[in-house]
Amino acid sequence: MPETARRADRPGDHRPGNRYGNRPTMKDVAARAGVGLKTVSRVVNGEPGVTPDTERRVQEAIEALGFRRNDSARVLRKGRTASIGLVLEDLADPFYGPLSRAVEEVARAHGALLINGSSAEDPDREQELALALCARRVDGLVIIPAGDDHRYLEPEIRAGVATVFVDRPAGRIDADVVLSDNFGGARDGVAHLIAHGHRRIGFIGDMPRIHTAAERLRGYRAAMEDAGTAVADGWMSLGGTDPERVRRAAEEMLSGPDAVTAVFTGNNRVTVTVIRVLAALSRPVALVGFDDLELADLLQPGVTVVAQDAAALGRTAAERLFRQLDGTLLAPERIELPTRLVERGSGEIPPSG
Amino acid sequence: MPETARRADRPGDHRPGNRYGNRPTMKDVAARAGVGLKTVSRVVNGEPGVTPDTERRVQEAIEALGFRRNDSARVLRKGRTASIGLVLEDLADPFYGPLSRAVEEVARAHGALLINGSSAEDPDREQELALALCARRVDGLVIIPAGDDHRYLEPEIRAGVATVFVDRPAGRIDADVVLSDNFGGARDGVAHLIAHGHRRIGFIGDMPRIHTAAERLRGYRAAMEDAGTAVADGWMSLGGTDPERVRRAAEEMLSGPDAVTAVFTGNNRVTVTVIRVLAALSRPVALVGFDDLELADLLQPGVTVVAQDAAALGRTAAERLFRQLDGTLLAPERIELPTRLVERGSGEIPPSG
């Protein structure tokens, strides 16, 4: 017997060259059970019209052959796939962990599978991923958008794909949106520093084209204006959240005659780096950060933050998605969830110098 | 004109009652372009035999109608789907963030979409999710297993689905496995405490049925035995990682005549709670934790950890998966990645009392 033939028959050989070539079909099940194809189809899809004895024979054949229903075929027949997609910005950002889990829990409560992927803050990649999920016929999409033009989704929405945007709004289409109150949260956080005597307050945020970053900057400006405080150019720095960029920005606004006595940071990635910069300084500088951090309460001083409820964002978005699919929502809405100021010490340090 | 008819035609009405009913088909494209169905199919699938002028007309019809290829249909025809699944344990555990992102980056480099879901540490849910992904015909699965019996995957593996287990081994099947050196890492961490003079050392870990928890306990026992130190029963506590359970376990082993002078924690969830317990004590207690934490270096004292390389785990697993799909791997292997002891202060505190 030639070597290749022996190989293919060897038990435990799990890597046939011809993938998918030997997956058992309903035809195989029908042949083994000695019944017609339609009978197998009835059993597989839980339809009536099969005697208990025949059903048992079919089930035995299914188990013996290891047959599994191909859901790709069902999608073509039935339309709905009982799956939803989630387009994240970054799988590794801890802010999205509780948000993803909340979406998954709502999906599961509706008997749907959650399919995830990330755009890595690249609008092209967001579009590619969203359309790839639509091509696999998800029933709906929860999107944390990287881009600001979502007209590419219009044919999908017309075709019935439910869509909800979360954390950031949709661009150039009318859609359900669930956001935190980024403007109000930032304004409150900066007002808190002002209430503790600060006037020279710096702002370090993410790239200005990101909605949340722009809104939080607007909140900073509003609080400063409310206090009648002019903002020096050097006190605002927007850009990527890589530690080197943030570190340089912080060091610059913390030096010179106009040095700030307090910093407001625009998100958790920025806060983590600024905490490191401030820890190395000899004088105390106040800090309030947007987004909570896991060990923020154990640092010396504890880090005062404007906390978002990431789980509530995910839950609210997913629930709206399933209400769209149920047909109980009529018009797109914009929902804003409140933020919460958590005082822990760093935001209550008085101005020095 | 009746209200319903007007509604369906109104531009911007994105929620038709009959979902999927009005998605344009290849037939619609063919009709609009004035060509045959086969010609549209050739253009959509990039096949030769179409004149540039005809291709342009078909493309214009595709754009005008918002037609998108249905990948479910392609799966049925071609076998491969250019997608892989990742079954996680918990979407919200920060350890899995860098791991997921690394898997996604490798998938993307191979032109594949990553589909994610979590088992929430429930073996039934792991099986349900893994089989649901197989039913949607992913080419391969990277699994962080919750269960210890994976024979349910045998028909899938025989059918050609590539599988790699990561973080924890497969149960009762022969499969590729990528792990951290959990035993060696824990033994080194406990030996580090012993080298700093500790003999009464506690161990708090996750549920003993979880492979990583059991291996780390084994490492603890080995280090204690190497040092000729008998382990009191009250020094070991395994169970869930919920803060209340961990807090009680820590408080018990830190009180009484046999109180420990150092604690080794079995994972990041446990470490976070034990840090809180130790911060509230009046005497210093040494701590080494398995897994790194984002702000561990900024706490007072900094937290000494046995760090895993979560990104390397994900990358290695995903690369093996694609090598299986390429047919360049012959036999399943078990790969163990080293851990790294990071000294930051908490693990170098001498025994007190």
Image (spheres, coloured by chain):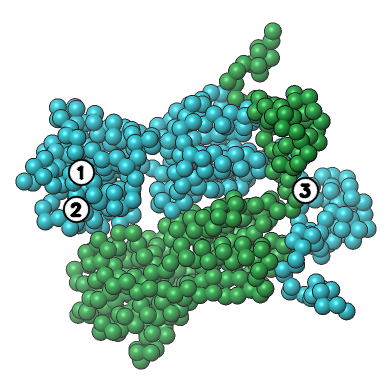
Chain colours: A green, B cyan
- Which chain hosts label 2? B
Kindly identify which residue carries mark 2.
B278
Q: Residue at x 61, y 62 (%)?
A: A322
| Label ID, residue A15 | none
Residue B98 visible from this viewpoint: no
Give the Cα distance between marks 3 and 2.
59 Å
Q: Please name the amino acid that badge 1 sits on.
A: Val
* Up-down relation of residue A87 to residue B129 (above or below): below
Q: Quadrant of the N terminus of chain A?
A: top right
- Looking at this view, is A320 or A260 the one in front? A320
- The secondary element bearing badge 1 is classed as strand
- The secondary element bearing badge 2 is classed as helix
Q: Please name the amino acid that badge 2 sits on.
A: Leu
- Looking at this view, is B214 or B75 the one in front? B214
Q: Residue at x 35, y 89 (%)?
A: A227
Kindly identify which residue carries mark 3.
A77
Q: Please name the amino acid that badge 3 sits on.
A: Arg
Q: Would residue B167 be found to the left or right of residue B327 on screen?
A: left
Counting from the top left corner in percent of width and height, residue A41 is at 76, 37
In contact (CB < 8 Å): disc 3 and disc 2: no
The reply to the same-chain question for discs 3 and 1 is: no
Counting from the top left corner in percent of width and height, residue A6 is at 65, 13
The reply to the same-chain question for discs 1 and 2 is: yes
Kindly identify which residue carries mark 1.
B263
The reply to the same-chain question for discs 3 and 2 is: no
